[in-house]
Image (spheres, rainbow, N blue to C red):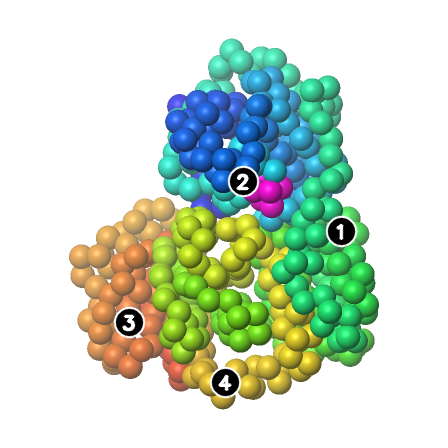
Amino acid sequence: MSEDIKFSTAGFRAVTADGLTAQSVQRLAYGISEHVLEHPFYGFEGIGYRKHCAEHGKKPKKPLVFVGFDTRFPSKQLAYVAANALVQSGVTVRMAEFPLPTPVAEWAVWNECAVGAVVITGSEAEYYVNGVKWISYYGGIANNEIMEDIEKRIPSPSAQILKASSTEFGSLNAAVTLTKDLRKGYMARLEQMINVKALKKSKLKIAVDPLFGTAKNYFRDFLEKFGVTVEGIHEGDDVLFGGVVPNAGPVSLAELKKLVTSKKMHLGIACNPDCDKFGIIDAEGNWVSPNEIAPMLLDHLVRNKKIKGRVCRSVITSNLIDQVAKANGLMLRETPVGFKYITELMITGQYIMGMEESGGLAVANHIPDKDGLLACLLVVDMLATEGKTLKQIKKDFYKKYKQLFDQKVSIPKTETEINRIMERLDIRPPLSINKTSVWRIDSTDGFKFILKGGSWLAIRPSGTERLIRMYAESMDENLPAALIKEGKKIIESII
């Protein structure tokens, strides 16, 4: 059982050449192989996987796993290590020849009834961090049960099995099949999800920023095929990501803002390096929060695509989603932070959208996990269908719904401090914040203090870093900053 390789909400991540090495990837791949071959529900002979395949009309004879990688250093070489370990364990492997977005790997798994996929990616982390994601047969990130099972099966660093090929870093086992075909099937799926007729008529001008990541082979090709004018930046290779943290947030998209305004584009779209999250810039160069984009897209799907069903969101995602759901008679479900909880609901087929405030969005009739490529293209789709700018759509939106304002901060703390803060908030929570009574406390994930009048402050530990994260939302534009200030006072008084 592994003590040093642990999954977080985003898979396994660590500093490259420190916690993330060829050996740790190989060990993890062996743990995954054993999971694939032996788990009674999620494995190749498992009842869950077999039922899934039967529903798709397929009867796989061998356990198939896809292997992909993002544009980081040394993701491709680490993917080779994972692929070699998998085939040595008796798993059939198809490896992407070029950098592969996580949603494309997930679509391939779901569409071809593979037992899963390994993607080597650090997602939106700093350039010196990398990681491993395991995608299960349902086309989404592994849930807690799967992660715990794999962790139990990871061999120790001194295991006999690691002596073979532990240094094979640049060569690929002949049993591994290289494939170029994964992009084609995914792009065809996008065409089914997007109103391409409206795109052809729209005369839209879209700026794209893949942030030196895997979106570089998708955005431009898809949009230009349907007559959209595209201007792009950061479409080349740079393992340092231009010196910024590639998270599709307002700081990282500063150059995209300039491109949008200087070229008078209708919209700017961006994805983090593995395309599981999105970023949007309006025609005036303003970064538009996912907390606004997701509710507008939900309204778009219901009004223009006539989609009906349930909606889910993480506990710290904007309550603006709730307004849209209620107005359209849609049941809403709240989940802990971590998109795997949303994925579990999307798998049921009852939910039309799942979203989180950090830029993750899933839509029905597609993979059950977050897809930044699709999210960006749905915003373009919304503009093309409505024949309006994002500013005009936003104005119309707020004629129907009450605008909410939000703010969030991350505060570095030691593990001991984080534990002390969470323990004290559990035992002795504040009864009022900013001179307003706490009406209810939601402990789904950390502590969300809901105040009289509907404003709220949430305090929770990060699932991936030693940080305390604070979030606040209110109809009063100035109140979130005040609530965050009070939150800082609360945690400082504890430590």
Residue linked to disc 1: 217
Residue linked to disc 4: 398
Instruction: Identify residue type, mark 3.
Output: Ile
Q: Pointer 1 and pointer 3: residues touching (CB < 8 Å)?
A: no
In this view, 302 is above or below 132 = below
Residue 407 on image: x %, y %: 45, 71
Q: Work out how far the residue at label 1 is from the one at label 2, CA to CA, in angstroms.
A: 29 Å
Element type where label 1 sits in the image: helix
Q: Which of marks 1 and 3 is in front?
A: 1
Report the span colored magenta: 106-111
Q: Extreme bottom residue here?
A: 399
Instruction: Identify residue type, mark 2.
Output: His
Q: Which residue is drawn at 29% across and 61% down?
A: 447
Q: How crowded is mark 3: few (under 14 residues within 10 Å), some or many (20 or more)?
A: many
As drawn, the label of residue 54 is: none
In this view, 427 is above or below 89 = below
Element type where label 2 sits in the image: loop
Residue 248 is drawn in which quadrant?
bottom right
Mark with earlier residue (4, 3): 4
Residue linked to disc 2: 56
Q: How crowded is mark 4: few (under 14 residues within 10 Å), some or many (20 or more)?
A: few
Q: Work out how far the residue at label 1 is from the one at label 3, CA to CA, in angstroms.
A: 43 Å
Quarter holding the C terminus is bottom left
Q: Work out how far the residue at label 4 is from the one at label 3, CA to CA, in angstroms.
A: 23 Å
Q: Residues within 10 Å of mark 2 (few under 14, many from 20)?
A: few
Element type where label 4 sits in the image: helix
Q: In this view, does 219 lie to the left or right of 59?
A: right
Residue 93 on image: x %, y %: 64, 27
Q: Work out how far the residue at label 2 is from the one at label 3, CA to CA, in angstroms.
A: 44 Å
Residue linked to disc 3: 450
